[in-house]
Image (cartoon, rainbow, N blue to C red):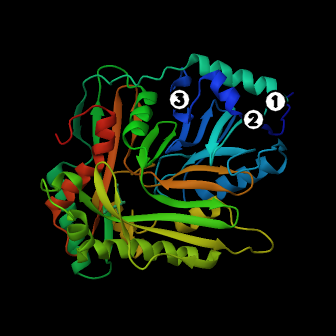
Amino acid sequence: MTVSFSLRTLTLALTPATLTELGITGPADLLGADPGVGPLCWLRLGEGLLGFGEIASFAATGPTRFADAEQWWKSLVATAAVNDPVRMPGTGTMAFGSFAFSKSSAFESVLIVPALVVGFSSGTAWLTQLSLDGAVPTAKSALNLLRALATARSSTPATPSVGTLRPGALSEEQWKDSVRAGVNAITAGGLEKVVLARDVVASFPEPVRRVSILQRLVELYGQCWTYGVRGLVGATPEILIKVDGSTAQARVLAGTLDREDEPAGSTGFADTVLGGSLKQRQEHDFAVRSLTRQLAPFSTDLSFPAEPFILELPNVWHLASDVTAQLASSNGHLPTSLALVEALHPTAAVCGTPREEAGKLILDLEKMDRGPYAGPVGWLDGAGNGEWGIALRGAVLEDEHTVRLYAGAGIVEASDPAAELAETWAKFRPMLQALNLPNHP
Ligand SMILES: C=C(O[C@H]1C=CC=C(C(=O)O)[C@@H]1O)C(=O)O
């Protein structure tokens, strides 16, 4: 006889004394705590969520993957017994997720409910134990699990063995031909922007340690959101949507300048070359417009600055716009973060304008399945909150020895294939660094 139990969760605030006793100064201290594949991860600037173990998961492919995941999550949450005195976004019931970029992808979109979550946000730290086997989490059982992790951890990222890099679906020449074809399609009319991506494959004689990659990304790209959901890892600078109660926020990026292109001793280089470029500005405006157009029907108030700002990352500068919306309730309910993800994905930062035409051209010209690259990655909770980045500057660990890296560039009429190719190398850099591979082979 199979007995199915409801989800049970217990959340505890972690006091500074407990954290000190366990030697935990922040979430990154626990990255190396899972002796297996390592935790589910969503971290930025010393805050975020780590998930350990897996008590339930949902997988889907196809055009209804978001709606199916939302339905599965809602039915799990509906019967959950939640003991959550902390009551912040990410406490109580929560799951990590990653979604395929394309409705025709073979990659399985997933939601994963961990057994234990450690969270840090706005000066509060907490611990949530989740169970689905009838066990009732207690403060003692939750703290024992955390203690075991804190004791097991290793904090030094191991340097990966010397790896080699080879082209993925297309050679550099073939990819530049695709960019040329993209520019020709734009010139011929019918679309204004298309984002074309490519993949490269890294091979290592020794097994690659997922945890080490996450540790390196946190160390080098702390202001990006370091994500890890099963084999998908990366550090994205772009937020598709973050929902905290009735407020939604997005960080839209498009328009890029390689920091290695800055001449020594120059001042105001990014302002002039990136901020002053009509081509880059056009690329950016398409991305902002696509997001705001899709978000507007869910909002009572939507605001973003008239001019983008320049976001400085260790590898590149981007044109960036932060968008804020007050969410409208419908029949007494606010939209959940996952409902917004479904409505917003894919923006013109990763697809193009118009969306349908660009999507078709991507399938035609890239000659690869993007898998989870450029898809939404992040987490959601039982109250509808969540944070979803766009899975950029990342890779998929295909097996112990093989890592597939992805990067793309926005193509507009004025695009030059060689410059766009160089831009993809700048965008591969975070993962190349994390994997200890040469900057630009
Ligand atoms: C498609 C990617 O970046 C997007 C986000 C920021 C800037 C972009 C650009 O300038 O082309 C892209 O739209 C990628 O990193 O693979």
Q: Which label is found at residue 137?
A: 1
Cβ–Cβ under 8 Å for marks 2 and 1 = yes
Rendered location of residue 389, percent (x, y): 50, 54
Label 3 with label 1: CB-CB less than 8 Å = no
Crowdedness near tag 1: few (<14), some (14–19) or many (≥20) residues, C-alpha within 10 Å: some
Q: Is mark 3 within 8 Å of ligand 1?
A: no
Q: In 3D space, how far apart are the residues under numbered discs 3 and 1 (Cα atoms)?
A: 24 Å
In the rendered image, the quadrant that contains the N terminus is: top right
The residue at 70%/62% (across/down) is: 245
Q: Nearer the viewer, residue 163 or 120?
A: 120
Number of the front mark, 2 or 3? 3
Q: Earlier in the sequence, mark 2 or mark 1?
A: 2
Residue found at x 22% / y 38%: 166
Q: CA distance from mark 2 to mark 1?
A: 7 Å
Quickly name the residue at label 3.
29
195 w.r.t. 197: above or below: below
